[in-house]
Image (tube, rainbow, N blue to C red):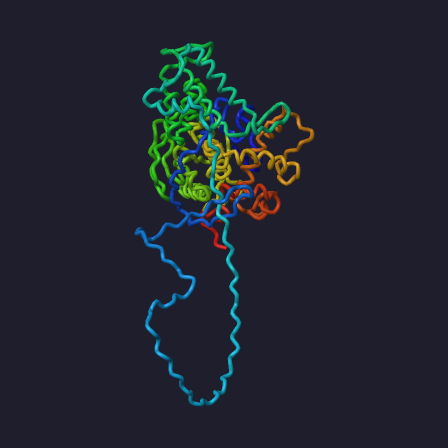
Amino acid sequence: MRSRKLIPLILITILITFMTACSETTSNTSEVATVVPTKPVPVAMELPTMIPVQPTSTAEPTPTSTLEPTSTSTAQPISIPTERPTSTSTSTPLPTPTLTPDPTATPTPEPTATPRPTATPTPVPTATPRPTFTPIAYEYSPSVKAWGDNCKSDPHFGTVAISAKEYIANLSDKSWQVHDNETYSFRLGEKVARNGPHTTWYFEMFLEDVSSYRPHVFETVAMGSSPLYYWEDYLGYVNAVCDAYQDRMQVRSSLLAHDKFLNWTGDFGKANNWEPFEYIETGREVIEAPNPDELEHYTQYITAGGVMIVGGDEVPEDAMLATYDRVIYMTSARPEFREILKANKVRISLFAEKHKAGELPEYAGSDEEGGFAMGRTDLGMTANHNWLCYPGNYDGGGDPVIHEMVHTLNHIVFEQIDEIYFYERIYDLAVSAIEKGIFATGFSWSNMDPQSTEAENMIHYVGEYWAITVEGYLMDQAGFKDSHDTHEWIKENDPDLYDLIIRYFPAEKWDLCSGELIQR
């Protein structure tokens, strides 16, 4: 969530991941896949081709590919002699006659013109290619591998049957252990902002669970005051994990199925409560929305870089197109992210300022003015269209599409691909920035009550540091903020952050309000 002053938003619940930017609740506890799927086919860019940028200081460079020969025929190698060959003729050579040359006059030498000095061209520096994205692969146990190879034909292959109540209790305990994982944590008093690829951690736990145990068949199970647990939902969970094992693009679906089975769902913007939109490639053209039931509010629809963008009648078409341009630009440096966004049904819902986010049926009653990020099990992200800069609407209140999209990429993409490169660095960068005083947040270390609302906002510091600084970088509007407002400022004053940003986002400048790249 955002405020017009770009102050980090109030934490909805202490136990959620800091990257959620107010969209996730305690019930939203799912995370990303361990192993990246086979590299997806990049979606064609609608913007001009981007120039490769400098890699991060520690990443491995992309290896240079070996060119394929133009001919498929097998040519015989040609031997290059090291000396001039000697004639093999055995005939006796004729004597060469000796001729007396006629005297010749000595020619008068022509004056030699002094050659014009040739200017040495200044070599054009070759941009270093962006480093190859190499997520860490998780080595599955033999039992997981055996189950995964057979789960389509036998979802309970190699498992041990236990009572339904014991199975549910064990799964719930293991799920809370993942939820409470404090790896890469940020602590203030007794409160912790948990950072790190929870989706990966959940999925690893799912695989060990479904390959080890199964409950005795049941119809429904009642446990305490919890809602009923259904056999049908259990099978949905097991089958979703099987699908995710065989197709890494389906990891989020396994999280949704897990939450449905354990009743880890809520009423506020949760994906389990709504049918998703159909993904339609539109290009840069707004079309009539293919509304699922109960979402008739949305009348406009466009897709960009694997992301669905929807809006109601009060959202101008120019705002839809401006959102399209932002998504295309933001994903241009990492086009492989687009297939992940598409597979996970990422959606941006635009709303009008006068009604706030509460005008949207999925967020009825909300008074949020800026927007929500999309969490691991959320339906989508939201953004106030009046805060966007586009022809006829030059608002200076920030850019909620960019800001919340940064969070959403963390939740949906980074967690699925287990991008620990990011998680291992952002914490230290954030702490360094606050200690140096180079990031204007309004927060301070001194005289802070850990129980205060300000302290709760501070829990989001690490995530908001990343989202706000990347927002400033991509907007590139000098003077818009006190710090981190341009490419140049960040590169000079927060260089390690700059290296991290260009690992994921384009280094090319663009015109925020027109969506055009700036030629410099």
Coordinates of residue 156 in the picture (x, y in percent): 37, 18
Kindly identify the residue that appears in the image at 34 percent across and 31 percent down.
Answer: 291
Q: Quadrant of residue 44?
A: top left
Which residue is more in the foreground, 75 or 253?
75
Kindly tell me whether residue 86 is visible in this rendering: yes
Which residue is more in the foreground, 417 or 353?
417
- Position of 51 with respect to 291 (left or right) is right
Q: Quadrant of residue 99?
A: bottom left
Coordinates of residue 72 in the picture (x, y in percent): 31, 51
Coordinates of residue 516 in the picture (x, y in percent): 45, 49
Q: Is residue 146 above or below residue 59?
A: above
Kindly tell me whether residue 353 is visible in this rendering: no
Number of labels in the image equals 0
Q: Is residue 388 above or below residue 71?
A: above
The extreme left residue here reads: 73
- Position of 114 with respect to 342 (left or right) is right
Which residue is more in the foreground, 136 or 301?
136
Kindly identify the residue that appears in the image at 34 percent across and 67 percent down.
Answer: 88
Coordinates of residue 101 in the picture (x, y in percent): 42, 87
